[in-house]
Amino acid sequence: MRTEHADVILPLTEEQREIQRTAREFAAREIAPFTAAWDQDSHFEPSLVSKLGELGFLGMLLPEEYDGLGLDTRSYLMALEEISAADASVGVLMSVHNSLPTQMILKYGSEEQRRRFLPRMARGELLGAFALSEPESGSDAASLSTQAVREGDDWVLTGTKAWVTSGSHADVILAMARTDSPDDRRGGRGIGAFIVTPDLPGFRVGKKENKLGLRASPTVQLSFDEMRVPAANLLGEPGQGFGYALASLDNGRLGIAAQALGIARRALEHAVAYADERRQFDRPIRQFQAIQFKLADMAVRVHAARAMLHTTAIAKDRGEPITLYSSISKLLASETAMQVTTEAVQIFGGYGYVKDYPVERLFRDAKVTEIYEGTSEIQRLVIARELFAQADR
């Protein structure tokens, strides 16, 4: 069975339906049959990058002049939900690429930078990544220590970035580094954003993390050992990179919300199907009220998370501020993913605890959505801050 998008309140256009259908069919054909094996082997499938690019799914939000599709945010998030329902590891690749490096270059880059990188990124010829966190700076991202020093026509970067999604296979990495002096730290106002490519001298891929979930998505450390970055690869102004990154995380949080929604929806689908198949006490377990209540609560959460996410997407495309709503969307969807997958495992019982059934993997994949691109605790801080800001106006 498949739970369809409820589009009574927020109707879909025919184009949006076609995008959703295309993404679903692609996921069923190219991703779903291999998901369990990729997870088991921690295998990253590089051919998916070019295949996603051929569909336009790596340039969905980019204008047509840069070989993108120029689509609305809701269409992008619906496609991302379909991909994530098949494999959240592929979903995070698509989310990070579309939401962070491409959008940062589009919004803050020079025309030369846009022409040099965006068309090839949209076509899937270059894969993008985002490097903000470090081993000692996670939620307190402004405390990062990677240093950038200007030397002639180059910036020399030294430091280590952590938790870089797709970092071992990325061709274009948006990396944050301090451009202020060690003797004159300026917090977030002393950080620049740099377009890093793996061919630069001093670039090295470090430790690959052995993760609980999203095992088919490589998460790595990146080491910059006096890496020389051409001055032409600085994004915008030297001390503004942290602001660019925070602004772009509004987009990133919507992407992770869509990923979480895909995980939750697929877990609900499996739980409904299993409740119909599994028999105990001479009847399908779907006939027991305890199971019915679990499924009902799961469905409520999934539909509420989708409604919040799509409403935020529509507001974004109208040009409205969405910091509050992107954090609400991310918080609601990620906690929904964790709650729904937990209940799915419970409905499957002992079978939910073994790798023979997919809800075990979905449960593992769900957890990180409460952590990356801003933990649930950080989302609550952002939400509270925005509420106070509104009250003070």
Image (cartoon, rainbow, N blue to C red):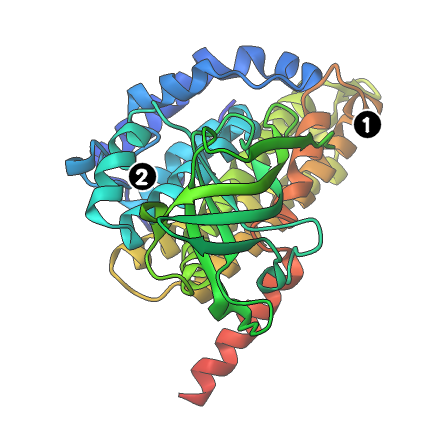
Query: What secondary structure is found at the residue carrying circle 2?
Result: helix
What x and y, as percent, mark residue 92?
A: 52, 35
Against 109, residue 363 (above or below) is above
Residue 307 visible, this orientation: no
Q: Which mark is residue 139?
A: none
Q: Which residue is mark 2?
A: 75
Query: What secondary structure is found at the residue carrying circle 1?
Result: helix
Against 288, residue 163 (above or below) is below
Residue name at image x 49 percent, y 74 percent? 386
Label 2 Cα crowd, 10 Å radius (few <14 / some 14-19 / many 20+): many
Residue name at image x 71 percent, y 18 percent? 357
What x and y, as percent, mark residue 109?
A: 29, 50
Q: Amino acid at mark 1?
A: Gly
Instruction: Determine whether, in the image, residue 249 is placed left or right of residue 362.
Output: left
The quadrant of the image that shows the C terminus is bottom left
Q: Which mark is residue 349?
A: 1
Residue name at image x 38 percent, y 49 percent? 310
Nearer the observer, 289 or 324: 324
